[in-house]
Image (cartoon, grey):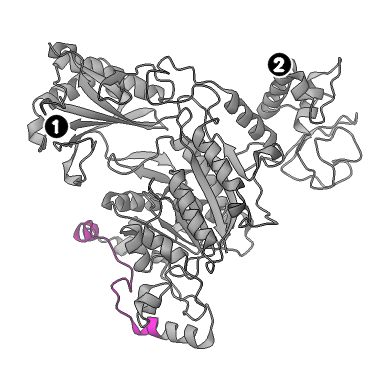
């Protein structure tokens, strides 16, 4: 009987045949035996049996009537294994898929395919956006990272006997401790682009605007209409916008004179729809100063069937001197057309089940490669022990924290072993719009995940309560530094008996957001009681105040506390604001800063940090950039 083949089986088989044809010596180098009579299902069997352990024996592989492997006629049939229970003994099984339904071999083949893929961009060489068109992982910053993590000063701080291995550890032992992954295809990955604008002609506005990137070492704009790393919707949006500026004669900003109107453009793609949120940066102080040109331009953008291309259109007024694309004042943002938020599925959620959404407005930070960053969030949430209390600094809209909250909440519901999901989640950042996006995301999630009562059941259904509250952020009890009698008693009990018994929190406090920078949030007690801390700082790295706290030794005499008010009786200079943190997950977009921070964390004599894993993600294929995820424990 022929084996049952699904889409994954066919993919692996075809990939194996392709590798055999192109590189037979490589294909058979690791246990594959060539045969002149090799058939389709035999290749599939050999390709798939390479690293799939049977849960019922010490053998590895897919079984085809072999008594040394799992046999459905002899052993219990688990539900996650597909098999052909025919009578001819030619039985066939495939199993061991990860959370995303992807088998380890398929993950490996996908990585190898991406490593060998070319971008083949017609603008390469003249465009400053990419430094590599082939072999996108062979970049200077990755070589520097490998040297750093292989140095003796770092190797002696690695946590040994680590049970959390990377999926690809056994495939390439030469790769060393620092693993490299390409989390998305090397083309069409960019879903957010910020582009400069200049006049297409110095003689006539009828030529419209030129939209693209500055050439290297200049402020001359280079058009990139066929950019291969842009999402197709971005290239389409730029093309439509360029033609619209020609039709309505939009004046482009001229840096030397300070005249003109259209200065920069930001395009953000909503992945679920492919529509573009377009932000037009205008050289104006007030919204009314953009008229009538803005109205003419928006009207032209929606003509000729192009209205479906746009998710929304925004105007941002920035008349400042210098190269800053956006002004810091949020009042400079003005919605022109369409909904206020781009919505994306929370990484790890099932869009069909509507398990939760992320909300992005144009003036909050969003990753340029959102699909690839979803893979980073997968490693982060899997590095968090179940039942942990998690604090996330530099949180943005809370993508990493909310992904972990959803993941562990779903695990709790599925396994029913009494181990809860996350104990609580606290996120913080200084942009006030981040907090609003976070609240919308939490309200889109299930009550059993967040612990919050749905809005329609709040306030006993009384109308107008939301309007009275307005946008004022609800502060947690004890955040103002005042200590209640209950907090005082809890603190005295834990101090006297040495216990680490946490106080009972209100379910509404289980998932919260604090509008504050990282240092301020830390000193306001945001990480008190947390045993996991996630940091995703900007390129400059951790704030010095945050780094100093993480380098402090654990104070065994400090009472367990989850609020700043519970340690208010202690001298502030003696409080360790990260006293209970045992796991630090550092997501870095600037490797130089990461190396500096790690050197201080690991070499601090009393902090006790040990390096568990370090993974480099080629998040922006083609660029000399690596996003590094480091897990440190103590």
- Find residue 77 and report its horizontal and vertical position in percent: 80, 44
Name the residue rendered at 53%, 87% in the picture: 497
Using the image, determine if residue 417 lies above or below residue 443: below
- Is 475 one of the magenta-colored residues? yes
- Find residue 438 and report its horizontal and vertical position in percent: 35, 51
Using the image, determine if residue 363 lies above or below residue 301: below
The answer to whether residue 348 shows anywhere in this view is: no
Relative side of 607 to 38, left or right:
left
Q: Which residue is mark 1?
A: 283
- Number of numbered discs visible in the structure rendering: 2
* Residue 493: image tag: none
Q: Earlier in the sequence, mark 2 or mark 1?
A: 2
The answer to whether residue 261 shows anywhere in this view is: yes
Relative side of 251 to 305, left or right:
left
Mark 2 residue element: helix
Where on the picture, by quarter, is residue 246? top left
Q: Which residue is mark 2?
A: 22
Where on the picture, by quarter, is residue 461? bottom left
Q: Nearer the viewer, residue 231 or 451?
A: 231
């Amino acid at each position: 009987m022929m084996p049952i083949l699904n889409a994954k089986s066919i993919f692996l088989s075809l990939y194996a045949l392709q590798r055999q044809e192109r590189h037979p010596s490589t294909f058979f180098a690791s246990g594959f035996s060539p045969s002149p009579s090799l058939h389709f299902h035999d290749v599939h069997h050999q390709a798939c049996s390479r690293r799939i352990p049977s849960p019922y024996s010490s053998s590895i592989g897919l079984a085809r009537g072999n008594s040394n492997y799992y046999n459905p006629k002899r052993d219990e049939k688990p539900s996650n294994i597909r098999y052909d229970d025919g009578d001819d003994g030619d039985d066939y099984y495939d199993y061991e898929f990860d959370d995303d339904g992807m088998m380890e071999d398929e993950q490996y083949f996908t990585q190898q395919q991406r490593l060998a893929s070319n971008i083949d961009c017609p603008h390469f060489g003249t465009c400053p956006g990419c430094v590599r068109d082939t072999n996108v992982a062979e970049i200077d910053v990755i070589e520097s990272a490998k040297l750093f993590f292989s140095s003796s000063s770092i190797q002696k701080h690695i946590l040994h006997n680590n049970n959390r291995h990377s999926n690809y550890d056994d495939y390439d032992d030469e790769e060393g401790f620092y693993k490299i992954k390409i989390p998305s295809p090397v083309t069409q990955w960019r879903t957010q682009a910020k582009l400069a604008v200049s006049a297409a002609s110095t003689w006539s506005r009828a030529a419209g605007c030129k939209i693209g990137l500055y050439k290297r070492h200049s402020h001359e704009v280079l058009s990139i209409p066929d950019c291969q790393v842009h999402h197709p919707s971005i290239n389409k949006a730029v093309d439509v916008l360029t033609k619209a500026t020609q039709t309505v004669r939009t004046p482009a900003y001229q840096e030397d004179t300070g005249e003109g109107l259209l200065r920069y453009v930001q395009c953000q793609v909503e992945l679920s729809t492919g529509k573009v949120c377009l932000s037009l940066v205008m050289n104006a102080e007030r919204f009314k100063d953009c008229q009538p040109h803005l109205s003419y331009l928006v009207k032209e953008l929606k003509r000729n069937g192009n209205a479906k291309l746009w998710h929304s259109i925004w105007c941002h007024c920035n008349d400042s001197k210098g190269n800053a694309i956006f002004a810091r004042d949020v009042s400079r943002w003005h919605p022109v057309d369409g909904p206020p938020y781009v919505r994306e599925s929370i990484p790890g959620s099932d869009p069909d089940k509507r398990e939760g959404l992320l909300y992005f407005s144009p003036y909050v930070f969003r990753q340029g490669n959102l699909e690839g960053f979803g893979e980073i969030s997968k490693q982060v949430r899997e590095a968090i022990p179940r039942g942990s209390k998690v604090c996330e600094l530099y949180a943005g809209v809370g993508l990493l924290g909310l992904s972990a909250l959803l993941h562990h909440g779903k695990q709790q519901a599925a396994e029913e072993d009494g181990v809860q999901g996350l104990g609580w989640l606290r996120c913080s950042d200084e942009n006030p719009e981040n907090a609003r996006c976070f609240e919308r995301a939490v309200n889109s999630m299930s009550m059993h995940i967040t612990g919050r009562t749905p809005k329609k059941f709040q306030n006993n259904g009384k109308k107008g309560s939301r309007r009275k509250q307005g946008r004022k952020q609800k502060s947690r009890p004890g955040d103002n530094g005042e200590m209640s009698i209950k907090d005082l008693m809890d603190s005295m009990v834990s101090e006297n008996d040495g216990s680490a018994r946490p106080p009972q929190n209100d379910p509404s406090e289980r998932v919260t957001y604090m509008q504050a920078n990282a240092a301020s949030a830390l000193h306001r007690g945001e990480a008190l009681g947390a045993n996991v801390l996630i940091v995703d700082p900007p390129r400059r790295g951790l704030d010095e105040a945050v780094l100093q706290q993480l380098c402090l030794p654990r104070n065994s005499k400090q009472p367990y506390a989850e609020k700043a008010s519970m340690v208010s009786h202690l001298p502030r200079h003696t409080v360790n604001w990260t006293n209970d943190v045992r796991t630090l997950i550092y997501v870095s977009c600037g490797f130089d800063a990461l190396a500096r921070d790690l050197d201080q964390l690991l070499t601090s004599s009393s902090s006790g940090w040990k390096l568990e894993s370090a993974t480099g993600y080629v998040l922006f294929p083609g660029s000399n950039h690596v996003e590094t995820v480091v897990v440190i424990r103590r």
